[in-house]
Amino acid sequence: MNGLRAVVVCLVMACVTVMSPAAAVTPAWSALPVPAAAPPVTVSDLAARGPGEAWATGYEHAADGLRPMLYRWDGVAWSRDTTFPGAGEPGWLGTVQFVGEEVWIFHQHADEGEILRRSAGSWSTVPLPHTLWVYQDFAAVPGAAWVVGEDDTGLKVLHYDGSGWTAQSTPDGVHYLMGITARTADDAWAWADTSTGTTVLRWDGTKWRDANVPLPPDSNVHTIVLEPSGRVTAGGSRYTDGVARTYLLTWNGRAWRTTYPPLGDTYTEAMVRGPDGALWLPVRSDRAFQSKYARVDGPRTTFSYGPERTGGIDVKPRALARAGRSLLSFGTAEIYGSKPHLMSERLGG
């Protein structure tokens, strides 16, 4: 009888270990020093090309307004880049992307928008055809780029084909584009606010169309992750009785599948596909002195924590990027008695 009870106890413990969402299955995160910026700071985006190059964007909140902020990772350390046009002027930096061998970054300064391009170690700019009231998002791939926002006439989708800009039209009933991403010049996706709710649009090289993505009822979209394999993953929130619940909607090449990982009401904008094949995203931490990350691999969700930060009262990863066989995180950390400052963490590598 004692032997049987021991077997049952072992089996129960094994099941708890397998099913616990908090089980750690990854190596530890480590802290990476980041040169100081004038706090408070806001992180916009992070992009990496292999383990030896990554760029993080954002802005400082200076006394005379916003100041653009750009950091580069060389595989060993973070350094601040102040060589780009307008680095010392009021403004901010948004989405950063790798386009072939170049780095492209959205830059707003003096109420005007432009694209910063870094090629062969030097910067140049691509000005927009006219000024928008609101610059919502930016996406770029070889042969094409898009800037979406609004002006006094309403929604604007500006398309760059390598030589010039044109304005693209969207289906009737689209009021606002909340975000855009692209896989190729003939395959771009956007999530929009329409007269019937949130809708996903797709550019096929000819026109924007409703992609007929079966979003959950009463939901929104935070991000769409496009992969070279053709897999598509949308992340957002569904509202039931006023309570938000995070969902993931995945296209596997044949059908869409909706899941509800145990993520609460996590904002999924920073979600990326990690080197291990799982989806990774930062989540609200239950430890004030540590960041927290979720790993979603099919039906299994696990969590890991960043390094402990003495005196930390709010550690917030804002962006994630795959850097070779590791993950990079960039965000802010608030230490008791001080304003939020920049922080970076790495998993693996």
Image (spheres, rainbow, N blue to C red):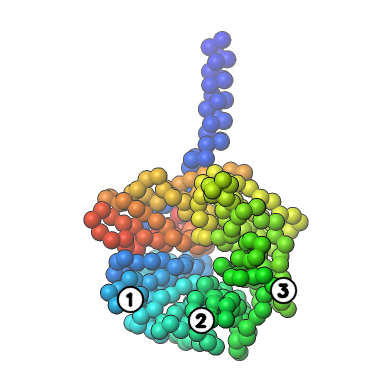
Foreground pick, 324 / 134: 134
x and y percentages locating residue 34 in the rendered image: 34, 65
Left or right of residue 145: residue 113 = left
Position above or below: 81 against 285:
below
> Which amino acid, mark 2?
Leu
Q: Nearer the viewer, mark 2 or mark 3?
A: 2
x and y percentages locating residue 39 in the rendered image: 30, 66
Q: Secondary structure at mark 2?
A: loop
The mark nearer the N terminus, 2 or 3, is 2
Label for residue 132? 2
In the picture as drawn, the residue positioned furthest to the right comes out as 254
Residue denoted by label 3? 204
> Which amino acid, mark 3?
Asp
Q: Residues within 10 Å of mark 2 (few under 14, many from 20)?
A: many
Residue at image position (57%, 50%) is 239
Q: Secondary structure at mark 1?
A: strand
Residue at image position (48%, 58%) is 327
Residue at image position (36%, 54%) is 315
Residue denoted by label 1? 65
Q: Let me know if residue 273 appears in the view.
A: no
Find residue 11 and report its image quarter. top right
Q: What is the distance, in whole Å, between disc 2 and disc 3 at their CAs?
A: 25 Å
Residue at image position (30%, 51%) is 312
